[in-house]
Image (cartoon, rainbow, N blue to C red):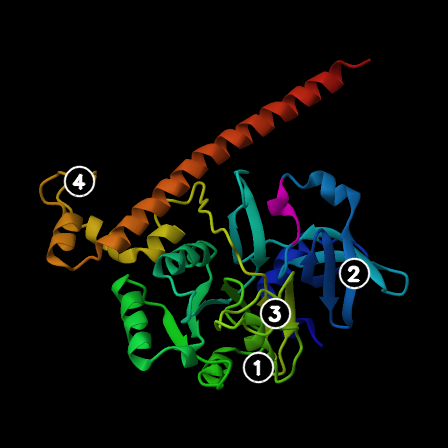
Amino acid sequence: MELSELGLDGWFEEQASLLCGAGQRLARVTAVDRGRYVVRNEHGEVPAEPTGKFLHAAASSVDMPCVGDWVCVQYHDAESHASIHDVVPRRSFLRRKSPGKNIDFQMIAANIDVAFIVQSCHFDFNVRRLERYLVMVNEGQIEPVLLLTKTDLVSAAELERMLANIRAAGIAARIITLSNETGEGVEQVREVMLPGRTYCLLGSSGVGKTTLINRLSGRDALETAAVSGTGEGRHTTTRRHLVVLDNGALLIDMPGMRELGMLLPGNLGEGSGLDESFADIKALAGRCRFADCSHTNEPGCAIRKAIESGELNPEHYQSYLKLKAESDFNEMSYVDKRKKDKAFGKMIKTVLKQKP
């Protein structure tokens, strides 16, 4: 393969020329599993690990390689393994708040052109969760496409009701309905995917992501599990990895996410992922009489008027408020954490300087 077939273009080459040193070559991270990496160049895949210098320079987990990254590597022992020296700047990314109480970012994948947000019509359908995924995708500068799977398990009327609920929430992204069982809609997904471009599948466990990859590739490239007696899928993917489909498109499969915490530090103003995902609310707020309207008791509030007239779904607005409040809280906690980290680092340096 040529590196261009793995997604390399002039922008990445220019960035890499400023980073990669003598004896280092470009490769793309295709798998990450508990700190172990696999990288791929035009000749194939090999295991890789970051150098000690790189690990020392990494300020946080965000700086570590993730699936989809382009990295500067040095090959060893007849190119049987490699050392990662640096990560090329990312053009797009997927990240979320780290699961649990830790207030920090967790990188999921990078350099993605289109994110397929997958929900099953059976058991998994949830508009509020779709909104969370859209905020994550929009914040990372990635184009979203919604996939509603397992349409064979619901009636036509139920499917139409789900589509109407999505549009009522102000979600304008393209929607493709499909069934891995019958194959209906799979060809539409395949038509979206172009050679050399990178796609990913986002969604809960058991919604049919891995089965879809196998259908798109035309072979059982990845392990799947049989559905339960209720028709609900089972979790099979255990690591994030990038595969090259027969048509040349690049697709990242990843485990289902149980938590989708919002953390958008410094990016809650113009052009943020929250603004893009709730563009209808932003537009309405711009029509309020007062620029600092809190949308509670002020006269001339366009948002209250839209809710009263039925133009704006109150659940959609409450979802916006909840995500914004969550992100604001996590942002404050994140900034406080960074300050403490910096203060601790300064203290260590001061102590080391004082030692004879």
Q: In screen coordinates, is 207 left or right of 42? A: left
Q: Amino acid at mark 1?
A: Arg
**Residue at coordinates 49% horizontally, 29% vertically from top-left?**
336
Q: Which residue is mark 4?
A: 296
Residue 145 in the image, given as x and y percentages of width and height: 43, 69
* Residue 215, label in figure: 1
| Quadrant of the rendered image containing residue 100 | top right
User: Mark 1 or mark 4, which has the lower sequence index?
Assistant: 1
* Helix, strand or loop at mark 1: helix
User: Mark 1 or mark 2, which has the lower sequence index?
Assistant: 2
Query: Which corner quadrant holds the N terminus?
Result: bottom right
Spatial distance from mark 4 to mark 3, Cα to Cα? 48 Å
User: Mark 4 or mark 3, which has the lower sequence index?
Assistant: 3
* Residue 47, label in figure: 2
Residue 160 in the image, given as x and y percentages of width and height: 29, 76
Q: Amino acid at mark 3?
A: Gly
Q: Nearer the viewer, mark 1 or mark 2?
A: 1
Query: Which corner quadrant holds the C terminus?
Result: top right
Are dots 1 and 2 in contact, CB under 8 Å?
no
Compare residues 17 and 107 and report the one nearer the observer. 107
Badge 4 density bin: few <14, some 14–19, many ≥20, Cα 10 Å: few
Spatial distance from mark 3 to mark 1, Cα to Cα? 22 Å
**Residue at coordinates 66% horizontally, 74% vertically from top-left?**
222
